[in-house]
Image (tube, grey):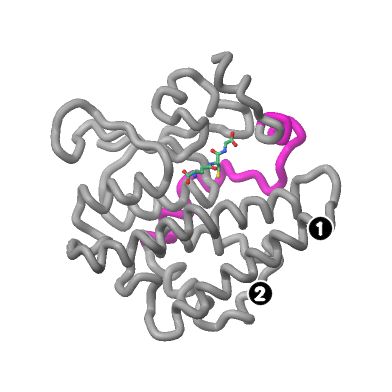
Amino acid sequence: MIDLYYWPTPNGWKVSIMLEECGLPYNVKYVNIGTGEQFKPDFLKISPNNRMPAIVDDEPLGGGAPISIFESGAILEYLADKTGKFMPRDARGKYEVLQWLYWQMGGLGPMAGQNHHFSMYAPEKLPYAIDRYVKETNRLYGVIERRLQDRPFLAGDYSIADMAAFPWIVPYERQGQKLEDFPKLKRWFETMRARPAVSRGLDVGKEKRAQTMSEEAKKVLFGQTAANVLTR
Ligand SMILES: N[C@@H](CCC(=O)N[C@@H](CS)C(=O)NCC(=O)O)C(=O)O
């Protein structure tokens, strides 16, 4: 059985979607990031970056002691390796997927995350910061749009690259984007959203998802320093 350390946000959805797509049984262990559960010493042992998602698999690929993995991209790769699903086995196909997976990890996710931060959560509305990240998100949507001109999914067949990118498009409105401006992306987004496993993945813990972030949660999440992890 796999333990999924999770909170219902785009990075968490990547893994709940993959687990649902693979039909793997899993236990959800909620990590309430708004109350600081990500700093508990037991969680830091699994996820030293104090971020969810993370998994612990007690029937690991390769056998032996349970394995723990943090970073959603590494988790998706592990689950693809373990099940043989959603990533081609040939080297060319595999690196096609990995390029788009890392593009999401290093680009779309962090930039859209900063977009959310400055547009919705920052105590001051800083026009330069908002404009920078809304524009960069827009450029990245354009990269997807261009990529999907001649293929249905980011890396050929449906893969972990799509499962990584899709959750970050779900909040497109709060990112200041319109799907109508990106018809191929819109078609891809709607195809994915219509998959029952994607829908089940998005539903995991949806009752815990706050519509607005409390002031207490902002204090926990923003302004972290090394002291947050070194003093535990
Ligand atoms: N690169 C990491 C990012 C994970 C991440 O940023 N998770 C956020 C929620 S979306 C989190 O756990 N935040 C807790 C915190 O900021 O203390 C991944 O993809 O796994």
User: How many neighbours does mark 1 have within 10 angstroms: few (below 14), some (14-19), or many (20 or more)?
Assistant: few
Quadrant of the frame with the N terminus: top left
Q: Nearer the viewer, mark 1 or mark 2?
A: 1
In primary-sequence order, the first of circles 1 and 2 is 1
- Across and down, in percent, residue 225 comes to 65, 27
Taking the image as shown, residue 14 lies to the left or right of residue 32, namely: left
Instruction: Please provide percent x and percent y for residue 120.
Output: 75, 51
Residue identified by numbered label 2: 178
Q: Determine the residue positioned at 70% across, 63% down.
A: 134
Identified at 66% across, 74% down, the residue is: 178
Q: Tell me which amino acid carries mark 2.
A: Lys
Q: Which residue lies furthest to the left in this view?
A: 63
Q: Name the residue under label 1.
A: 128
Residue visible at 29% across and 37% down? 2
**Numbered tag placed on residue 230 in the rendering:** none
Q: Where is residue 15 in the image (x, y as percent from the top left)?
A: 40, 49
Q: How many labels does the image show?
A: 2
Q: What residue type is labelled 1?
A: Tyr
Which picture quadrant has residue 210? top right
Q: Of 90 and 202, which appears nearest the observer?
A: 90
For the residue labelled by badge 2, is the local secondary structure a helix, a strand or a loop?
Answer: loop
**CA distance for labels 1 and 2:** 21 Å
Please tell me whether mark 1 sits on a helix, a strand or a loop: helix
Q: Nearer the viewer, residue 151 or 217?
A: 151
Query: Would residue 226 be found to the left or right of residue 47 on screen?
Result: right
- The reply to whether the magenta stretch includes residue 122 is no
In the picture shown, does residue 120 fall above or below 71? Answer: below
Q: Position of residue 215 (x, y in %)?
A: 77, 34
Q: Residue at x 32, y 32 (%)?
A: 68
> In the rendered structure, which segment of residues is drawn in magenta?
197-220
